[in-house]
Image (cartoon, rainbow, N blue to C red):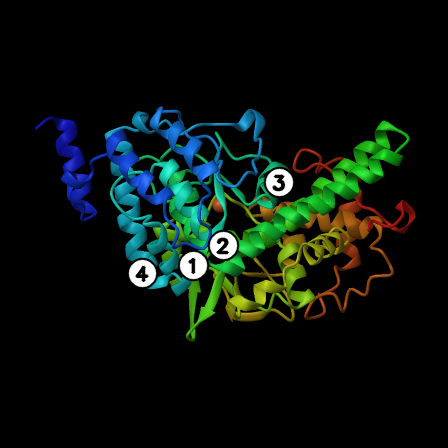
Amino acid sequence: MSTEKTDFAIIAARHGIDLSMVQPLSLPVRLVELERCLARQDVPYPILPEHAEPYFAAARAGKPFTVGTLSGDTVDVGQYRNAQVYENYTFEEHLSWACLIAEQQRTKHQYACLEYLSGEKTFEIGGTIIPDFYLLNARIFQQTSWQLATVNMIIPAELFFTCHSHRFFPVTTFMRALEQDYLAEPDIGHDVAGHVATFTIPVVAHVMQNHGLARNLIYDEQDARLAKANSDAERNKIQQKADELLLYAERIYWFTVEFGLVMQQGSVRAFGAGILSSPGETLYSVNSSKPTRLLIDPSLDTDLLRLATTDYLISEYQKTYFVTERFELLDSLTPERIVATAKLASKLPHFSWRDIAPGDQVLNVGESAISTNEKYLRLMSNQICDDCLTRAAIRNLRLIDHGIDPSIDLQKVWRGPIAQVPEAIVEWFKREDEAHKFLQITKPLHFETANDGPVS
Ligand SMILES: [Fe+2]
């Protein structure tokens, strides 16, 4: 046995995998399975023959998968377009998939919510070889009417949510290195093994598509305002505002679809794809004393706003998780509500991912939790510990200095009254900011005030 094969055997054994099961299927074998799948009528969304026939012909001709064509609708991901060339996956990549799935299964079976586990059975995501997207896309469509579009990297949020508005989910095609647990960038282990089962949870699919429709509302309004704009400066401002609103809408998606926890049968369970694609974070998010867990009712405006006003980093495990009281409450996330919340968030001070605020329904206080004013004190004393605190502190102090919209009652927008920032801190910040001390750290954000005209 060669050295490489010996190494693979050791790694496979470490994850309880029979190396002989890591056998990619040939095209003829995959085609037999695909033909059988496309013919199924006992599914929620049977595939029409006019879509099934050219789809199968493309697969049979060996055309790489790029975007699902089973609904008559499509999306164009432009420069981010990619293709799954199935035969190009190496044995090592298939083994990496097998190892990740084996580890995911161990943690998911303990900590994922029941709906997620049943979704995984529907799509047969497990196994020891990377899924063929022709087959996977057909199965997803038949069960949920969602489809896949392959992309080559993280795509801009505006395009990501455009895809969602058409029920297309952008997926990468590459597989992480052997035994890598957490990735800031998505791969198939995240996009497929993490996300796909969540499409079967109706409320999660609903939240996903509604973020796409919220994106449409934000950019339709942008276009209407652009049509009346008289200068480049005004056009710039309008575009920045739309991007900013989408950023706050994206936070709601982040803390639910990506990193959401839910109470189930008296226990905390995970449904976020970002959590469940990382075996390490699955354990950490549910079982560790390190992160903060806050209980939320997303049907309450105060709680939805808490999500939209909470900043985070993607480079490491989360510091705060939001635990939805019951799945059904996510049904309240309409596109209109998401946009209204993002608009209000754009006028308010924000929280860092370590903050615990008065009124938060705290399930447990994480080891790195801080009070809302501590980030300002840390900024003053040069003891900032991460970029999220820096961003939130500078943004808030600029906003306060600029003047928060007086028509907003800050004591009522969240569940509890947020401590006022001491005047001395605001004065100190003003002096430092005028001396351009923070320009390298974060670029200034544009804040609208009553003088800028209504945002809505
Ligand atoms: Fe994701």
Residue farthest along the bottom direction in this orientation: 266
Name the residue rendered at 56%, 24% in the picture.
Answer: 79
Query: Which residue is labeled 1 in the image?
Result: 285
Q: How far apart are marks 4 and 1 (CA)?
A: 14 Å
Sequence order check, earlier mark of 3 and 4: 4
* SS class, disc 2: loop
Looking at the rendered image, the disc whose residue lies closer to the viewer, 3 or 4, is 3
Residue behind mark 2: 259
Q: Mark 3 points at which residue?
A: 162
The x, y position of residue 157, in whole percent, is 61, 39
Q: Residue furthest left?
A: 1
Q: Is mark 3 within 8 Å of ligand 1?
A: no
The Cα–Cα distance between marks 3 and 2, rounded to whole angstroms, is: 21 Å
Q: Which amino acid lies under the numbered mark 2 shown in the image of this protein?
A: Phe
Q: What element carries label 1?
A: helix
Badge 4 or badge 1: first in the primary sequence:
4
Cβ of mark 4 under 8 A from ligand 1 = no
Closer to viewer: mark 1 or mark 3: 3
Give the CA separation, mark 3 to mark 4: 33 Å
Can you see residue 448?
yes
| Residue 402 x %, y % | 83, 48
Disc 4/disc 2 C-alpha distance (Å): 17 Å
